[in-house]
């Protein structure tokens, strides 16, 4: 994958990127001509690359909420598995909920990253069609949330901080999940995460949908990647309820105020983590490195806070949400 500062790659899967795709095609043609003939086209190529960088920045600065939802769902956007591979020095996965089974939509494990050791909990979507089906596209069952909480309690016992990666359109909505106590499992996680006596960091790396996201989303610090979204319901679900039509998803996305900038302004997240030029899917390594730097900063900051004060700050942080301020 090319660095964005050298050659911003473009994908033809997003409608608003088509002008960028056309410009990239021209650059590729000139590069091929430049290397296969005696023509010297380097200056023309540099001009077009600079134009592509500027145009990419302009396009992404003006994205609508619905367009950002589509970026958050991009097939090449780094997933939890990519963060495990590129961000961690060591990772030992821990399986099962001791009741029903091992839900592949939630991954838990002991992680080492430089001098820091912590428990990692994240939604797992899968990359291949087979893996995506096995992971229910990141939609966890109750046993996934029970697994997450059991491992969080284990981390508390070992005095390890907890880092969660949120990337789900929502909890699995099937009959089996409801029969096994989906709502109760999520509610218990939300309740018990408030009382974990270790630092908890939550990062929305893609989709943050409904209770499926909140089930691992209560933390001392909550961050979002720039082009991720976090919402009480998906735009399609909201449109189906309010307008009885999925065609109204763009309007629903606008009304839900689900973008990272909206949520930062409303005080629902603590930090928006900037993505590489044109989105994390263009430069996964760069995106992972930015998330890593923010996690290290927060781990260091939270480690210095005594446990009673940490718990009080966590409770106060969530109590303040939705409260009008004088600002």
Image (spheres, helix red, strand yellow):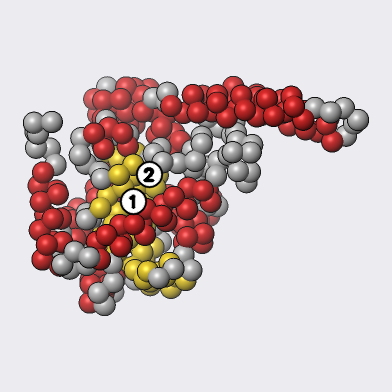
The x, y position of residue 154, in whole percent, is 26, 74
Q: Is mark 1 on a helix, strand or loop?
A: strand
The x, y position of residue 69, in whole percent, is 39, 34
Measure how far apart labels 2 and 1 are at the Cα level: 9 Å
Q: What element carries label 2?
A: strand
Q: Mark 1 Cα within 10 Å, few/some/many (few <14, many 20+)?
A: many
Q: Which of 128 and 8 is in front in this view?
A: 8
Q: Disc 2 or disc 1, which is closer to the eye?
A: 2
Residue named by callout 2: 273
Q: In which quarter of the image is residue 262?
A: top left
Q: In which quarter of the image is residue 200?
A: bottom left
Q: Residue 203 carries which label?
A: 1
Q: Which of 98 and 230 is in front in this view?
A: 230
- Residue in the image at 30% along x and 25% along y: 254
The answer to whether residue 104 is visible is yes
| Above/below status of 317 relative to 43 | below
The x, y position of residue 64, in whole percent, is 39, 25
């Amino acid at each position: 994958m090319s660095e964005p500062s050298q050659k911003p790659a473009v994908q033809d899967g997003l409608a608003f990127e088509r002008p960028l795709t056309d410009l990239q095609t021209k650059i590729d043609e000139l590069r091929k001509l430049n290397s296969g003939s005696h023509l010297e086209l380097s200056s023309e190529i540099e001009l077009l690359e600079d134009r592509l960088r500027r145009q990419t920045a302009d396009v992404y600065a003006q994205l609508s909420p619905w367009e950002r939802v589509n970026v958050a769902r991009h097939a090449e956007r780094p997933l939890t598995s990519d963060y495990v591979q590129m961000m961690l020095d060591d990772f030992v996965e821990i399986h099962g909920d001791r009741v029903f089974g091992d839900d592949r939509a939630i991954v838990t494990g002991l992680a080492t990253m430089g001098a820091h050791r912590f428990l990692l909990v994240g939604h797992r979507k899968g990359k291949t069609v087979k893996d995506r089906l096995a992971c229910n596209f990141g939609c966890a069952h109750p046993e996934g949330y029970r697994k997450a909480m059991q491992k969080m309690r284990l981390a508390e016992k070992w005095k390890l901080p907890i880092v969660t990666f949120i990337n789900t359109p929502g909890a699995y909505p099937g009959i089996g999940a409801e029969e096994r106590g989906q709502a109760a499992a999520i509610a218990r996680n939300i309740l018990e995460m408030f009382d974990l006596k270790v630092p908890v960091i939550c990062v929305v790396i893609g989709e943050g949908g409904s209770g499926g996201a909140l089930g691992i989303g209560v933390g001392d610090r909550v961050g979002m990647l720039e082009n991720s979204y976090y919402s009480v319901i998906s735009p399609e679900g909201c449109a189906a309820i309010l307008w009885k039509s999925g065609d109204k998803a763009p309007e629903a996305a606008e009304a839900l105020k689900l973008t990272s900038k909206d949520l930062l302004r409303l005080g629902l997240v603590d930090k928006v983590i900037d993505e590489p030029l044109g989105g994390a899917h263009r430069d996964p390594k760069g995106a992972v490195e930015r998330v890593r730097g923010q996690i290290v900063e927060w781990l260091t900051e939270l480690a210095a806070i005594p446990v009673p004060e940490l718990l009080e700050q966590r409770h106060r942080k969530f109590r303040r949400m939705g409260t009008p301020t004088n600002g």
